[in-house]
Amino acid sequence: MKTEFGVLGPLRVAVEGEDVDLDQPMLRRLLALLLCAANSPVSAEALADALWETTPPASARKTLQLYVHRLRRRLRDPARIAHSPAGYRLVVEPGECDADEMRRLVADAHATVDLGRRAALLRDALALWRGVPLAELVDVPAVLTMSDALTDRWLALLGERVDVDLELGRHSDLVAELTEVVARHPLHERFRAQLMLALYRCGRQADALATYHQAREALSDELGVDPSEALCARYQEVLRADPALDLPVRPSRPRPAQLPAAPRDFSGRADELKELDALVAGGAGLVTISAIAGAAGVGKTALALRWAHQRRDDFPDGQLYVDLRGASTANPVDAAHALGEFLRALGVPAEHVPQELESAAGLYRSLVADRRVLVLLDNAHDVNQVRPLVPGTSTTVTLVTSRSRLGGLVAINGARRLLLAPLRPQESHELLVTLLGSERVGAEPDAAAEVAQACGHLPLALRIAAANLLDQPRRRLADFVADLNRNRLSTLTVSDDDQAAVRSVFALSYERLEPAARRLFRRLGLVPDLDVTSEAADALDTVGSTRLLEVLHDAHLLDCRTPGRYSFHDLIGLYAKELAEAEEDRPAREAALDGLYAWYVGRLAAADRLLVPYRPAVVEADPAAPFDTALDVLAWLDDEKSALSALVHHAVATRRREVAWQIPFLLSGYFEHRGTWLLGVRLLRFAVDAVMELDDTDLECRARAQFSIALVHAGRVAEAVREQQRCLAIAREAGNTQREAATLNNLGWMHHEQGDTAGALASYEAAFALFAALDDRGYMAIVLQNIGDAKSLLGDFAGAVEHHERSLAIAREDDLIGQQGDSLLSLGQAHARAHRHDDAVRVFRSALPPVVEAGNKMTEALAHREFGHSLRAIGDTAAAADEFALAAKLYHDTDDVHLAVAAYLDLSGVRAETGDLGAAQRAFDSARQLHLRAPDPINARRLDAMASGLTSGCPKGVSPAESP
């Protein structure tokens, strides 16, 4: 039953679209009180005290029960108001309350980097306002508190939306609105400053100055105070026509250019190219999807790429491309992964890519809204793979290539279909002329026609045939046709007529290769979905594959869409796989795959050592791995993640259990650094399934631990807890105390993520008892730190300090440099939370040397920032500014945009406190520009508060406790 609660104005309730008549004042008061604590219990005593302004009558409890009964009947749902020993709880589902809807719209606004979209969403949120919240019930203290909070939030949102409109250059539209707002809120200096800026940008400098004088008079008359320093500074800027007031140049948005190279020697298809032009031109006002469906080898991708390159100037905001691998049964690309790649290409940092498919799709649509973008979705499997990747506005064009007809896209999404047939005879002739030259084709026109006929007029087959002929410049075309026809009887041909022609061309081309190239071709077919480098090919076959890969590429048996990486057309890959199974015995095939997997696992182990140096090694690392830094590792894994995913799928399909768990496990550090948690969940699920068949309980728990971490980051905390509880049962049943302790420590972190600090503390303490019994001092230090952190959050600062000092003592005794820094950092935080800032300053100062020595730049940045907060608290603002500046630079250098914004805002606040408003504004501008790259609600609130502070005389903005 659909119920709507309205609190952004007079109280309103509707059930199934019909307003509920709450004619009794006590029912309205009761509902308002329950709404103030929606989904949380309110005791009967608290309700009685609030309902009766004077002392509640003796019959208050029974009367309250009667009111609850009546309210349930009015709401037409007895379960809507739940009762427990803790009191009465109003159940409000997501989206049922207008205040929740306002928060959702604001969160969407903060999640988009498109300023126009952000302004529109904020405008929609503000439009929900119907007047003073619950104005008729503000005599109830709890209601008054909520009403005031909502009113303050509305004013802050209005100011935020005006800031965005100013940044968009809409100053002329704002003058009338801000004049009215200032009249209603004459003492609100933020609106005054915004009106001054809007007037100035409209060329009305005198009116902007007059606005300041009116503000000064109003403040003097009403409050007996002068305007704030910030408003005075704005006056001076307007007076001297400061260039800083001019409309800033907005940072350019990323313009992805992801199209692979245009196909070589493209010929024919003039009619189809014109039809594509017509389909796109006819889609004005609609999202145009051209589904190019046809048999394998017919040239779908080539046609799409040819058209895309010809029309790329029509899409100045970028071109997005993804190979969805729809023809692969083992390793198709899911929509969530493709969305993540698109979002990163559009400028969203990996850590801010939503993990849920719907959220990622929504952000994607927001980013490309009103932009001229071309999206090419190559080799789609079905409509479910495509739909989330289709933008929602008519300014974009989406091309989809697929072997299927994608009828669902046509029926539901309004796609326009282009069915691609083999080349016409004249087009086949033109392609052969392009490839072989007019003289050779003209000398044997009939034989050339027979070549085209034997190739089924399929571009792929024609190109391979031409590659063969180019290697034999004196060979007659008629002789080639004779060989081609003989190869049609190959035992490898399939029953499908359209494939038989292609297969015979493959066979003829393959037989002309030198033995080493044939062997490499076959062995690449062992994992046909893989895209390989020469190093990987060396591991699969023999050293010296670089030349052989180029031989295969020149013969059109391998594609090379990215320099240095080679892959099969899916038909050629299947042919290579069949050859491998027919011509290589099983031991040779297994030995080749063993070499390939060993090479990848050895490289991954070396990569893991740099990304997760504290984790015990599970596989021997390749000493020849060319990695010096974590950045080297990340760059390599960015290039290899598609190949590694293909290898995991192959290992699962071929029951290579060791590899099926090793690769995902060794990739877990990459998932954390890049934030690719959806990929992590998918691959680590395979790892868990693989180790369950190995009958190794310790290994199973380790795999489940990594899987659980991925689940937590993907927002599936409850599932993660269940995985860890399973680990706990396995470890206890096996008597594995070490694993039991590690699992309890993981559960503590997960309880913390769920907001259950007390539960986290209990898990940490149980883990510590076990580690202490094992005398595992490294983990004892870690868990003591975790216990201290939990106690600090619970307000037990003495207990927190005690545990952090014990952790520090172990770290010093055992020379654990990294843990020394971590323990000192947590100890300083505990002192800071207890407002013992002199002690915190002393501890943070001593934490910096071991933190820097450990080499973790993120921890180093955190240490500088926490040090800055405590220095600020004791009044040493100059030193605090230095620490915040160092933290901002480190976060910026490590590409953590979210925390870099927070540190710049810290710096802005402390500069403002010292009266250096120019430096404060510069730091604020740095924060705001970075925030556009990675919006998030916490920093958005801080930016709003800081902007208000800079213009209202409260330069501190927000306290450190409120910052991320």
Image (cartoon, rainbow, N blue to C red):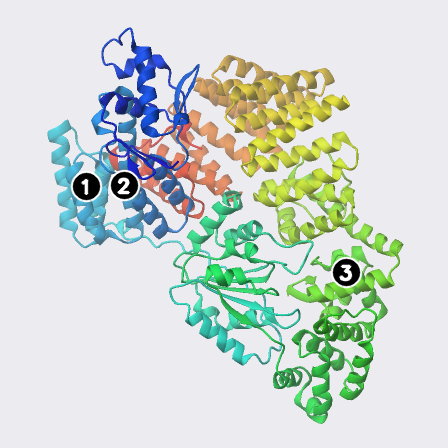
Q: Which image quarter: residue 701?
A: top right
Q: What residue type is disc 3 on?
A: Leu
- Residue 561 lies in what quarter of the image? bottom right
State the quadrant of the C terminus: top left
In-front residue for pair 621/311: 311
Q: Which mark is residue 181?
A: 1
Q: CA distance from mark 1 to mark 3?
A: 69 Å
Q: Is residue 701 visible?
A: yes
Q: Which mark is residue 661?
A: none
Disc 1 secondary structure class:
helix
- Which is more N-terminal, label 2 or label 3? 2
Q: Residue at x 87, y 60 (%)?
A: 584
| Contact check, label 1 and label 2, Cβ < 8 Å | yes
Which percent across, then down, holds residue 559? 68, 66
Locate residue 248, reporting x and y percent: 32, 52
Q: Determine the secondary structure under disc 2.
A: helix
Q: Which residue is mark 3?
A: 524
Dot 3 surroundings within 10 Å: few (below 14), some, or many (20 or more)? many
> Label 2 belongs to which residue?
158
Identity, as a three-letter code, of the amino acid under mark 2: Leu
Q: Is residue 239 visible?
A: no
C-alpha distance separating marks 1 and 2: 10 Å
Q: Earlier in the sequence, mark 1 or mark 2?
A: 2
